[in-house]
Amino acid sequence: MKMKVSYAHDLRKNEGRSTTVYNIVGAAPIMVPEVTEASERSDIVSLSLNIENNKETSYLDNTLCFNGDFNKDYSHVLSNGVPVRQSFELPALSIRNNLRMIIPMTDKLSLNLRSNTTYLRQSTSLRVTPMLFPEIFGMKQADNAVQTLHSSQFATQNSLFGSYIRQFYHDGLPQYSNQRRNTAQYEESTLHGFNWL
């Protein structure tokens, strides 16, 4: 059994200043100074667990992986003396499992099982305080604007088939592929198989 765990943390901060000038025909130019403070934070967690068991009666190889990516962005903008705050969160989770199993039925016939399963989930949340341009949405005033989105995905692919181990020759001497644990040799001749999703 093998286990691997990793963690990464990243934090970035930046500041900026700008002045936007709006030139309007027949009117004096409008100057809008802005001061921006922002931070970007990312935390990534990864866990992998592998189990491999090679016996005379069966061969098993299973890998389970978990990944978590947590991103958070914050910003504060002082636009023409009006403070505007914005927060954006983007967490993502994924789980993957890959299974491979070979069971010898006779000296030359083996049963093969393969399964690949993946689950993904991602959520986003955007909040702006106060809400800018509420008149676009038919409102006179709003304390904040919140937008959320959730998405998830589940996929699995499974197969079960039988393999026949054939005899071959090397340097004039008979050799048998069942003497070596190699998946490619088990797949040389497939007798029966079916897949389900």
Image (cartoon, rainbow, N blue to C red):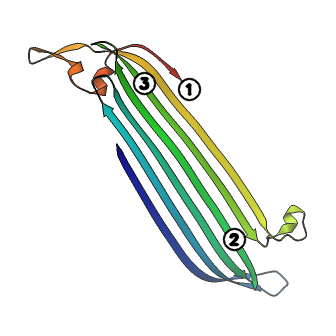
Residue furthest left in the image? 172
Residue drawn 84% across and 85% down?
27
Quadrant for the N terminus in the image = top left
Comes first in the chain, label 3 or label 1: 3
In the rendered image, residue 169, in percent from the top left (x then y), is placed at: 15, 15
Q: Give residue 197's mark.
A: 1
Amino acid under disc 2: Gln
Comes first in the chain, label 2 or label 3: 2
Looking at the image, is 177 positioned above or below residue 71? Answer: above
Q: Which residue has dot 3 on it?
A: 113
Looking at the image, is 74 positioned above or below residue 182? Answer: below
Quadrant for the C terminus in the image = top right
Query: Of helix, strand and loop, which one carries label 2?
Result: strand
Amino acid under disc 3: Leu
Along the horizontal axis of the image, is 179 left or right of 120?
Answer: left
Residue drawn 48% across and 68% down?
10
Q: Give residue 86's mark.
A: 2
Along the horizontal axis of the image, is 176 left or right of 12?
Answer: left
In the rendered image, residue 141, in percent from the top left (x then y), is placed at: 88, 71
In the rendered image, residue 131, in percent from the top left (x then y), is placed at: 80, 70
Towards the viewer: 100 or 11: 100
Rounded to the nearest whole Å, what is the CA distance between mark 3 and mark 1? Answer: 14 Å
Tell us which disc is closer to us: 2 or 1.
1
Along the horizontal axis of the image, is 166 left or right of 163?
Answer: left
Along the horizontal axis of the image, is 77 left or right of 96?
Answer: right
In the rendered image, residue 144, in percent from the top left (x then y), is placed at: 79, 69
Query: Of helix, strand and loop, which one carries label 3?
Result: strand
